[in-house]
């Protein structure tokens, strides 16, 4: 019997469920004074209804659970049980596979997959490996793995560190702790932990794999390449080593070698859609567009639910979907069983498809659906970003730059091209990289990583973090940071004296850039506010740029960007070149001359004929910058003007 005079907590509900008191648990869940979060509420309801054989209500509870928490693995495990009871083995298998993809610590799901694998040897092998791993994993580390997969990183970190206090040389515990560090973007700690693992267990393949991944995240491509090559050379028949080496070659811009190795992988695994997708990206970057298209089409021909393959086609900006492909996409976004993160790719793909057909109302509907999902799963706060910009303005004063003038590393190598994404940075880079003295590289994350690292460094005063720490950094410290930035860029360079860093978000850190690299060139490329913001809104970014998923967020971000850039130009007069995208398109030759003059480079006609360059381009604009400039697209956003009133209302500039 339930006590009507006391409220129920999550723990008490869980105890009722684990004790088999499902009816009492349901009664408790229906009380108004229950203290439980929405996720646990629907999950426990589904479990109780399943055990009470009320499969209809169990399914309804799971639908609500997945609607609000689309990445909760245990929801799909429950769904797998429901479909198994209903004898729908195909859907059950898909549900269990989805569960372990989100949380590979779900032992019960792996066991269920074995029963449903229907002789699929590759799948059975994967199950056996994971079941064996989980069976031999200490209970504390199983919890760490589960919590990490569920995003409970603080709890996972605490349990893992407690375990390591008792067993300080446990390699698997250190490896799991490194995965938590990677999730928290503390790449340096992850690298150190994995290096420690290799001291105790130098032949551990999992550790080597994670170590190379950590090196790639830290942009240490030289060491990553060396380590991946050693792993592959030692295990030439091992597919994991082969794929990892091929991926590292790709990241280090060694496209021809990467393509050859991935072709070998596809010969061994002809149905590997992830490799097909990567091959498509490789061909796109290398300018082999027909092969890129074929790779993407092959990927979703093999797996019709592979949303990333559709979006990769759309993201070429030049591909047009067929009527049959559009119909298939429309059916899949209505299919309740297609995972939401796959639907996101499909929403943006349909947005592009209808845009190409001139059906802008329908196009906007799909762009909006994709953005709404992304925004619901984002932790971005426009208030936090505004505060960040205000802190930069408060700390980075004219006095600071006068006192620390020329303290940093004196190299003149870098040219920073920054601003908003989709504002013309790739075009500006392509123009500059067509010059014989300039190397095009990437959207290098190095400056962002330096800022992140400085933010983790506390002085005696608890409040002394980035950007405040810029006030206390000494001349030798600033010089070393600048020198390390130059060293870290070497892997992307040949013998050209200048290189481009086109990470757009670097505008937030111009003060830092000027202090560590006082002779660096900085170009702010800017587009009409409505055109620039809407171009961001209809772009599904691979990672980051979370401000683009809401029109209100976009307007706020753009306003903060303009105000921060105005500050930089005020406190660093004549240091920053402002380039308006519309001017660049309208008067290309004079704009090119102006850019080259600022960079102290002699004029070269190749910069005007940038589209003839054969260099690799990794950004979404890759195919566009291989063509002459078209002026017709400047006011393209006006096709969507009826749906952008909130954006227009909130933009100040």
Image (cartoon, rainbow, N blue to C red):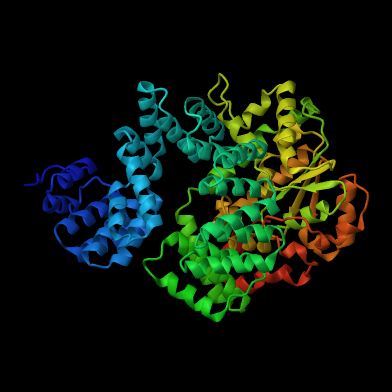
Find the residue positioned furthest to the bottom. Answer: 323
User: Residue 375, relative to residue 361: is it above or below?
Assistant: above
In this view of the protein, can residue 38 be seen by the observer? Answer: no
Say which of 509 and 229 sits in front.
229
**372 left or right, relative to 606:** left
How many marks do you count on the picture? 0
User: Residue 30, relative to residue 335: is it above or below?
Assistant: above
Q: Quadrant of the C terminus?
A: bottom right
Say which of 421 and 574 sits in front.
421
Name which residue lies at 39% across and 25% down: 164
In this view of the protein, can residue 383 be seen by the observer? Answer: yes
Residue 283, quarter of the rendered image:
bottom right
Say which of 16 and 436 sits in front.
436
Find the residue positioned furthest to the top. Answer: 460
Name which residue lies at 76% across and 58% down: 427
Give the percent coordinates (x, y) of residue 592: 87, 56
Residue 626, quarter of the rendered image:
bottom right
User: Residue 269, relative to residue 635: is it above or below?
Assistant: above
Find the residue positioned furthest to the right. Answer: 602
**517 left or right, relative to 11:** right
Residue 82, quarter of the rendered image:
bottom left
Name which residue lies at 26% across and 64% down: 83
Give the percent coordinates (x, y) of residue 251: 64, 47
Give the percent coordinates (x, y) of residue 645: 58, 67
Say which of 235 and 142 sits in front.
235
Give the percent coordinates (x, y) of residue 50: 19, 58
């Amino acid at each position: 019997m339930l006590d009507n005079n006391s409220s129920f907590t999550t723990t008490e509900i869980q105890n009722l469920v684990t004790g088999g008191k499902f009816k009492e648990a349901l009664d408790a869940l229906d009380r108004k004074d229950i203290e439980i979060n929405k996720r646990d509420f629907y999950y426990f309801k589904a479990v109780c209804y399943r055990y009470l054989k009320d499969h209809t209500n169990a399914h309804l509870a799971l639908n609500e659970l997945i609607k609000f928490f689309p990445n909760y693995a245990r929801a799909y495990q429950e769904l797998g049980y429901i479909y198994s009871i209903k004898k729908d083995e195909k859907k059950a298998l898909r549900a269990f596979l989805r569960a372990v993809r989100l949380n590979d610590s779900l032992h019960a799901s792996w066991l269920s997959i074995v029963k449903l694998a229907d002789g699929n040897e590759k799948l059975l092998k994967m199950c056996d490996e994971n079941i064996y791993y989980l069976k031999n994993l200490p209970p504390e580390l199983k919890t760490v793995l589960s919590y990490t997969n569920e995003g409970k990183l603080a709890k996972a970190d605490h349990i893992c560190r407690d375990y390591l206090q008792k067993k300080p040389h446990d390699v698997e515990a250190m490896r799991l702790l490194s995965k938590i560090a990677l999730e928290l973007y503390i790449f340096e700690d992850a690298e150190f932990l994995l290096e420690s693992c290799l001291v105790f267990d130098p032949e551990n393949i999992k550790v080597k794999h994670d170590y190379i991944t950590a090196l790639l995240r830290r942009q240490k491509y030289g060491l990553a390449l060396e380590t991946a090559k050693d792993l592959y050379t030692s295990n030439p028949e091992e597919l994991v080593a082969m794929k990892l080496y091929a991926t590292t070659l790709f990241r280090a811009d060694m496209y021809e070698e990467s393509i050859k190795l991935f072709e070998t992988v596809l010969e061994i695994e002809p149905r590997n859609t992830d490799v097909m997708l990567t091959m498509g990206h490789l061909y796109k970057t290398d300018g082999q567009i027909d092969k890129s298209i074929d790779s993407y089409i092959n990927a979703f021909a093999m797996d019709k639910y592979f949303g990333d393959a559709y979006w990769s086609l759309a993201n070429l900006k030049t591909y047009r979907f067929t009527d049959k492909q559009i119909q298939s996409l429309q059916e899949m976004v209505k299919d309740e069983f297609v995972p939401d993160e796959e639907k996101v790719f499909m929403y943006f793909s349909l947005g592009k498809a209808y845009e190409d057909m001139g059906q802008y109302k329908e196009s906007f509907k799909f762009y909006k659906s994709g953005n709404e999902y992304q925004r619901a799963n984002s932790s971005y706060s426009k208030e936090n970003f505004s505060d960040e910009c205000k802190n930069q303005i408060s700390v980075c004063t004219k006095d600071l730059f006068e006192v620390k003038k020329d303290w940093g590393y004196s190299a003149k190598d870098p040219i920073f091209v920054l601003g908003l994404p989709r504002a013309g940075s790739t075009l500006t880079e392509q123009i500059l990289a067509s010059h014989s003295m300039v190397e095009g590289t990437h959207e290098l994350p190095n400056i962002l990583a330096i800022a992140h690292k400085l933010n983790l460094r506390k002085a005696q005063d608890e409040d002394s973090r980035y950007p405040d720490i810029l006030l206390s950094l000494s001349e030798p410290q600033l010089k070393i940071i600048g020198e390390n930035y130059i060293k870290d860029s070497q892997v992307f360079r040949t013998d050209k004296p200048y290189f481009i860093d086109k990470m757009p978000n670097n505008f937030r850190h111009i003060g830092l850039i000027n202090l560590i690299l006082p002779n660096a060139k900085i170009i702010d490329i800017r587009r009409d506010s409505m055109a620039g913001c809407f171009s961001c809104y209809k772009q599904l970014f691979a990672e980051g740029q979370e401000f683009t998923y809401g029109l209100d967020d976009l307007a706020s971000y753009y306003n903060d960007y303009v105000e921060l850039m105005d500050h930089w130009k005020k406190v660093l007069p004549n240091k920053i070149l402002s380039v308006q995208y519309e001017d660049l398109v309208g008067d290309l030759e004079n704009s090119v001359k102006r850019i080259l003059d600022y960079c102290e480079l002699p004029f070269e006609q190749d910069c005007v004929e940038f589209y003839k360059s054969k260099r690799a381009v990794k950004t979404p604009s890759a195919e566009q910058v291989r063509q002459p400039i078209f002026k017709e697209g400047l006011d393209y956003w006006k096709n969507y003007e009826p749906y952008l009133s909130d954006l227009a209302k909130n933009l100040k500039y």
